[in-house]
């Protein structure tokens, strides 16, 4: 929900841009910190979800660590003041250059995704006379019950080391003198809304840590990854359910004395803090379809086109007018959504690809050239995936404070 002052401000600006509500971001970070510290859990922010500098600065100020998936993310984390002792580095294809950079930066831990990678890190660390901390990313074959494009923990996925390869891991760890085994790491997918999935993950983590201990490798760190989902259907009300999420791990993870439990949350920390604001360029009324052609497309927000993701779409120019008309209505937001005059539009972007469509058959009040359209809950995997395809301008961002 945008205030009248916000909408007036947007009207004066060039579109498209990301609008960051720093208050929502702060509230979300607060909720996550409160829910995690009471269990003594360590949270690393998964930087790939959003590395906007203002967002990073605020997250860093809460004391979270950073979960990185490239050498440049490791660099950005350190430049933004994240404690290098709280930086973890995952990724199925770390290059030698990236590994060397992270070794020089003395990060907390490499989350290693293959036996070959273990050997490479060992070699590069040895050449520097260093010992690299490693955790083994295990593919637990746990179904995340999320979209198949964002599932990462099944046998058919490229991520992590399969359970049947663990004897080879043990052999490699025994012979790699420049590696220090810290623990085990998991990340089974994203936008997980069914907390039962995390119970299954806990069961698997408990088995795996026993396996390592039985083979002579004390497990200090249990890193459960991230993936906690958000409610894309209620952009104004719900922040992620951190309380119940952490409670599942408290109840079902077998944490031994001296062990640390780590999490890597991306989406849940940032998704609700931003919207993509754009304008209607053209309205095309056809026989079968009405199209709203926006000045934003897959070059600004690719999630709908890449993973069939849902984002709520609002005509905020119109919602402002109807709000004024419906001032006495107790629930103007829902009233707006269901106006009898709503028309179904395919909301599309300007990019020369047929998949450049945010959503088909969206019910919106009759819309006109120049109306402002908000694509909500766009703070995660939005701005960071912007591209220059069609030689588009880089999307801008503005902040509530
Ligand atoms: C992307 C990623 C995360 C964060 O996932 P979210 O769904 O955004 O919480 C955590 N860990 C690893 C290894 C990742 O690649």
Image: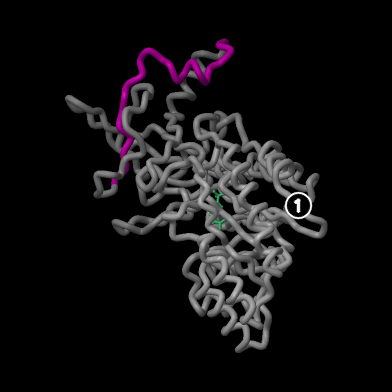
Q: Is residue 290 visible?
A: yes
> In the rendered structure, does residue 216 fall within the stretch colored magenta?
no
- In this picture, is 76 found above or below 333? below
Q: Quadrant of the N terminus?
A: top right
Q: For the view shown, which residue lies furthest in the right direction?
A: 257
Say which residue appears at 59% left-offset and 75% top-offset: 171
Total numbered badges shown on the rendered structure: 1
Q: Position of residue 255 (x, y in %)?
A: 76, 52
Say which residue appears at 62% left-offset and 46% top-offset: 269
* Viewer-proximal residue among 328 and 13: 328
Q: Position of residue 137 (x, y in %)?
A: 57, 62
**With 362 as the anchor, is 62 left or right in this view?**
right
Q: Which residue is mark 1?
A: 255
* Quarter of the rendering containing residue 197: top right
- In this picture, is 125 found above or below 102? below
Q: For the view shown, which residue lies furthest in the top direction?
A: 328
* Viewer-proximal residue among 168 and 6: 168
Judge the density around disc 1: few (<14), some (14-19), many (≥20) Cα neighbours within 10 Å.
some
> In the rendered structure, does residue 346 fall within the stretch colored magenta?
yes
Q: Is mark 1 within 8 Å of ligand 1?
A: no
Say which residue appears at 70% left-offset and 47% top-offset: 253
* Viewer-proximal residue among 243 and 237: 243
Q: Is residue 81 visible?
A: no
Q: Secondary structure under badge 1? A: loop
Q: Position of residue 308 (x, y in %)?
A: 38, 41
What segment carries the magenta color? Answer: 328-350
Q: Position of residue 20 (x, y in %)?
A: 56, 44
Say which residue appears at 57% left-offset and 78% top-offset: 121
**With 354 as the anchor, is 124 left or right in this view?**
right
């Amino acid at each position: 929900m945008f205030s009248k002052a916000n909408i007036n401000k947007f009207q004066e600006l060039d579109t498209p841009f990301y609008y960051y509500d720093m208050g929502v971001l702060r509230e979300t970070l607060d909720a996550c910190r409160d829910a995690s510290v009471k269990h003594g859990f360590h949270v690393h922010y998964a930087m790939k979800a959003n590395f906007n500098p203002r967002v990073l600065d605020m997250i860093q100020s809460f004391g979270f660590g950073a979960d990185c998936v490239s050498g440049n993310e490791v660099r950005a984390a350190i430049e933004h003041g994240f404690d290098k002792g709280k930086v973890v580095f995952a990724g199925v294809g770390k290059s030698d250059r990236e590994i060397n950079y992270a070794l020089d930066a003395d990060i907390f831990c490499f989350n290693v995704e293959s036996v070959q990678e273990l050997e490479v890190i060992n070699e590069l660390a040895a050449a520097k006379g260093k010992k690299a901390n490693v955790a083994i990313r295990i593919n637990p074959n746990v179904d995340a019950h999320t979209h198949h494009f964002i599932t990462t923990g099944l046998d058919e996925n490229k991520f992590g080391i399969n359970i049947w390869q663990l004897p080879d891991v043990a052999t490699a760890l025994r012979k790699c003198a420049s590696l220090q085994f810290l623990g085990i790491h998991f990340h089974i997918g994203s936008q997980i809304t069914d907390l039962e999935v995390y119970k299954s993950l806990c069961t698997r983590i408990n088995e795996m840590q026993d396996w390592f201990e039985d083979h002579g490798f004390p497990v200090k760190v249990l890193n459960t990854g991230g993936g906690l989902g958000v409610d894309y259907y209620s952009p104004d009300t719900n922040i992620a359910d951190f309380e119940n999420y952490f409670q599942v791990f408290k109840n079902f993870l077998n944490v031994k004395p001296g062990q640390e439990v780590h999490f890597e949350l991306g989406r849940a920390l940032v998704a609700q803090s931003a919207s993509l604001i754009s304008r209607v360029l053209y309205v095309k009324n056809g026989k079968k379809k009405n199209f709203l052609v926006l000045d934003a497309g897959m070059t600004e927000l690719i999630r709908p086109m890449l993973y069939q993701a849902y984002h709520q779409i609002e005509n905020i120019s119109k919602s402002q007018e109807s709000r004024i008309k419906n001032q006495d209505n107790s629930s103007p937001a829902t009233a707006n959504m269901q106006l009898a005059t709503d028309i179904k539009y395919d909301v599309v972007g300007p990019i020369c690809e047929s998949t450049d469509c945010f959503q088909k058959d969206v019910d919106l009040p009759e819309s006109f050239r120049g109306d402002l359209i908000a694509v909500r809950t766009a703070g995660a995997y939005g701005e960071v995936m912007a591209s220059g395809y069609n030689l588009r301008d880089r999307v801008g961002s503005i902040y509530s404070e």
